[in-house]
Amino acid sequence: MTALNDLARSADDVAYVESQLNAVELADRETSRQKSTLNQLTQQSAAWLIAVSSKHLRDEGVARNADSTYNGPDLVQWLVDRQISKARKEWERDSDTLKNAAERQAEAKAIKYEEQAKGLQDQYVLRADVLQEFEAMASEVRREMENVSKLMAPDFPEERRDSLVKELDNHLRQVLRRLAAKGRVIA
């Protein structure tokens, strides 16, 4: 307080500071009084606070203080817990009905799909098996194509044999390159 008075430059400043300090002390006392009042509510005040009848408070067996008054914060917490419990029970009841119907439908679909899959199991081949067979076949085709010029060379006229073999090899390499490029695009 001395520090605030030292900052004051006039009697009006001192009066203003003192009035503000008094207001803070009054508010603090008022807050303490209100808190103590909320900790000792009569049955009618407690019923009014949470918007229920006095009879309802008594019938529900809400916890009381030792002097038979009600504690406001505890009362509000009781009401919130009760509302949460009530909402949870409603939700569980509703969700059990919906959940069971949804679960039954999902299980029926799963069983149906499993039966369909069993029926189709012999009709479909695994992708890995197809890919392995394709690679083996492509390798075999490549070897055969590379040997075509050697196999056909005896059928060519001798004077043009070398040039025809080279030309045939070039054409076969181009075909293999185009097929390899297509294979990369597809994969």
Image (tube, rainbow, N blue to C red):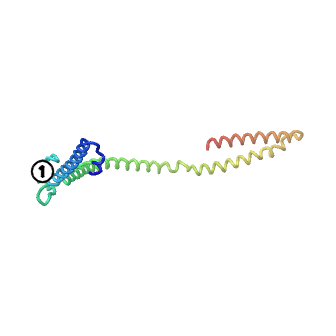
Kindly identify which residue carries mark 1.
56
Q: In this rendered view, identify the residue nearer to me: 154 or 145.
A: 145
Q: Name which residue lies at 60% across and 49% down.
A: 130
Q: Residues within 10 Å of mark 1 (few under 14, many from 20)?
A: few
Residue 7 in the image: state x and y as whole percent. 30, 46
Q: Left or right of 181: which side holds 121?
A: left
Q: Left or right of 14: which side holds 54?
A: left
For the image shown, how many numbered marks are present on the structure? Answer: 1
Residue 150 in the image: state x and y as whole percent. 81, 46
Q: Left or right of 109: which side holds 185?
A: right
Could you tell me which quadrant the C terminus lies in? top right
Q: Name which residue lies at 74% across and 47% down.
A: 144
Q: Name which residue lies at 10% across and 49% down.
A: 44
Residue that protrudes farthest toward the front in the picture: 10
Residue that protrudes farthest toward the bottom in the picture: 66
Q: Amino acid at mark 1?
A: His
